[in-house]
Image: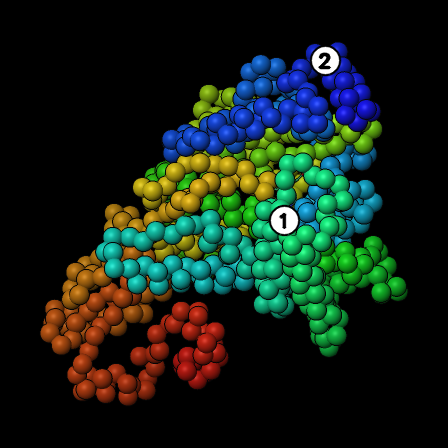
Amino acid sequence: CRIVVWRPYAVTKCFTNQGIMGPSYSILSGSLDEMKKLRRVAMGTALNTNSHDITERVIPHFTTWSSQYGETFLYWYGLQARLFISDPELAKHILSNKSNIFVKPKAMPTAELFAGKGLPLINGLDWFRHRKIATPAFTIDKLKGMVKGMATCTVSMLDNWKNHAISSADDQCREIEVHGEFKRLMADIIAHTAFGSSFVAGKEAFKAQLQLQQCCAASSTDTFIPGSQYLPTPSNIHIWKLDRKVKETLKSIIDGRLNSPKTGNSNRYGNDLLGIMIDALDIFQSRAGPKLKMEEIIEESKAFFVAGHGTTASFLTWTVFLLCKYPEWQTKLREEVLNECSVGIPDADMLAKLKLVNMVFLEALRLYCPVIRLFRQGSEDTKIGNLMIPRDTCIEIALVEIHRSEKYWGQDAKEFNPLRFINGMSQAAKHPNALLEFGFGPRTCIGQNLAMLAGKTTITLILQRFSLSLSPEYKHTPIEHDDILISDGPTGPVMKLSPKLKEQLHKPWANAIILKNMGRSHTLSFMTMKLTQKWSLIGKWHLTDLGETFLYMHGMEPTIYISDPELATQVLSNKSGFFSKVQFPSSFETLFGKLGLFLLTGQD
Ligand code: HEM
C-alpha cells in the first residue's frame, strides 16, 4: 500500500502543489503504457536526413508531455517517480552538487553484471576512492603517448576497408556499415589504453563482455522481478558462464602483471590504466594512499570498456554521418588535416592544431550526443531554488533537448553549424552549461580526453584516405539503445567509400588520376600514403609503353607490371637500396613478423 498507492499519491501532491504536473499515475505501470504507445508510433517513422530534430523520435514522451505540462514535469516509470528537466541552470545545480545528495540511481542487477560495479554506477566514498586512483591514467600527457597505438588500431581497420574496396567488382564505390566498424575499433583502442602490453588478452575479455551485454539486454524486461536474477534459468546460466569468463580472463591478466619481473618503469606494473590500478591493490599494505581490492579492479576494467566503447563509437558514427551530409565540411576538414598532419600518421601535437575538426566534433556531440539523458536520485528531501524535491525522486536531465533548445542556441539550434564554436564552447550558447555532452561537475566523464583524441586520430586517418558519402539505402532512424544514441534498423549509418576525390585533390593526387587511365583501370577508391618515393620511381619508366610493361592502379597504389627478365634482373639485383620491399598491410606484419628478414629493408 505504501509503495504502490501512498507514495505515488504523496509525491504527485508535493509536485502539484509546486505547479509541476504530469501524466497520471496508473497502479504498478505508472505512465509506462502511454510512454510505450508514444514510442511505438515514433519508431514507425524515419526522419528526413536533413532533419536533426531527433527529440520527437528518441524521446517522444518529452515532446508530447512538455507541450501539455511545461518543460519540467513529473512522470512515473512504473513505481519510480521521474522529474523531467531541460533547464541547464537546474541541471548545473544537480550535477555539481558535491554533498552526495544527488546520487546515481541503483542500476538493475543485469546492468551491474555487464557494465561492472565501477565508477559510472557506484556512489559515496567508494566512488571517491576509485575516481582518485583512476584519474592519473586519463591525463592529457598520459594519453598523448597513446596516439601511436590508437593510430595502429585505426590503420588496421582502414587496411581492411582498402582490401574491401579492392576486392569490389563494382567500379564505383564500396559501402561500409560504420557503426559496427567503430565499435570494433574502440574495443581495440580501449584495450590498448587500459591494458597496454596485455592488449590481446584484454580484447578477449572485452569480447566476452560484449556477449554478456547482448545476453543481458535480451533477458531484461521492463518490469524487474526482484530475486529473478538468482533463478537458474537457461538464460541466467548462460549469463553466469560469460560473467565468469570475463572475470577469469581479467584476473589472469592481473596475475600476469603481478608476477612479471620488475622493469625500469616508473610504475612496476605498467603505466596504463591497469598498471595504475594494480599499484593501488590492497595487498600492498605498505603503500600510502587509497586502495582497491582485486574484485574492484576487475569491475572497474569492465566499467571502462562499457562506458567508453559504445559512446565513442556512436560519436564517430554520427560525425561521419554529418560529414557525409555536409560535403563542404568534409572538404574543409580534409584540407585542415592535410595541412597539419600531411598524409602520415599524426601525433598528439598535430592533432591539437585541428581547430575545424574540433568544432565539427562539438557540433556532432551537440546534435547527436551519444548519452542523451543523465539520471540522478535524491538521497534525501532537498530544495533547489524554489523547487522541493522529495527523497528517492529520480531526476532525468534531457541533454538531447537542452542541446537543441532555441532559447540557448538561437534560431538555428536544430541546424548543423560548427561555426557557432568558432570562439570556443563558452561563447557558443546563451547559457554556459547548454552543452553537457560529457556531463558536468564531479562526475563528469573521466574518458573525455581519450574520446576526443581517439576521435581526432580516427577522423584524420580516414580523411587522409577516403572520400565519404551516405548510402542511398541509409534510413535516418536515431534511437536510444542500451542508453546510447545509435541508428536503428538493419541499414545503420552506411557510408560509401567514394572515388570522388578527384575534385578535391591536392598535388600528388592529380598525378594519381592521370596514371589511372594508363593500362588497366582500377577504381580509385582510396588514398595512398607516402607516395613520394614511388612517384620518382615511376618517373623512370616509359609510361606510354602499354605493351608487356604497363602501369595499373592497385587501388590507389600505382603498380608497374613487368614481364621482361632483363628488367626484372635489373630491379632485383640492384644493391643500392633503390628498390626496396613495398610497404605491406599491417596484417602481413603480424603474419611474417615486422622485424623479420621477409619485411625488413635497408641496413636492418
Ligand atoms: C564521446 C564519447 C563519450 C561520451 C559522450 C561520454 C559521456 C559521458 C557522460 C555524459 C558521463 C556522465 C554521466 C553522468 O553524469 O551520469 C560519462 C561518465 C563516464 N565516462 Fe564517458 N563518455 C564518452 C567516452 C568515454 C570513454 C572513452 C571512457 C573511458 C574509457 C569513459 C568513461 C566514463 C566513466 C568511467 C564515467 C563515470 C565517471 C564517474 O561517475 O566518475 N567515457 N561519460
Whole-Å distance between the Cαs marked 2 and 1? Answer: 37 Å
Is the residue at mark 2 in contact range of ligand 1, meaning its CB lies under 8 Å from it? Answer: no
Q: Is residue 489 visible?
A: yes
Report the front residue among 8 and 350: 8
**Mark 2 residue type:** Thr
Report the front residue among 239 and 330: 239
SS assignment at label 2: helix
| Residue at the spot 28% in from the left edge and 85% down from the top edge | 572
* Mark 2 / mark 1, whichever is N-terminal: 2
> Quarter of the image holding residue 90?
top right
- Residue 98 position, x and y percent, is 78, 35
Q: Residues within 10 Å of mark 1 (few under 14, many from 20)?
A: many
Is residue 478 shown above or below 354? above
| Residue at the spot 47% in from the left edge and 52% down from the top edge | 180
| Residue at the spot 18% in from the left edge and 74% down from the top edge | 541
- Is 60 left or right of 438, judged from the image as shown? left
**Mark 1 residue type:** Cys
- Is 169 left or right of 203, judged from the image as shown? left
Label drawn at residue 216: 1
- Is 496 left or right of 180, judged from the image as shown? left
Is residue 587 shown above or below 235? below
Instruction: Give the residue number, with chain letter if any, for mark 2.
Output: 16
- Residue 58 position, x and y percent, is 52, 32
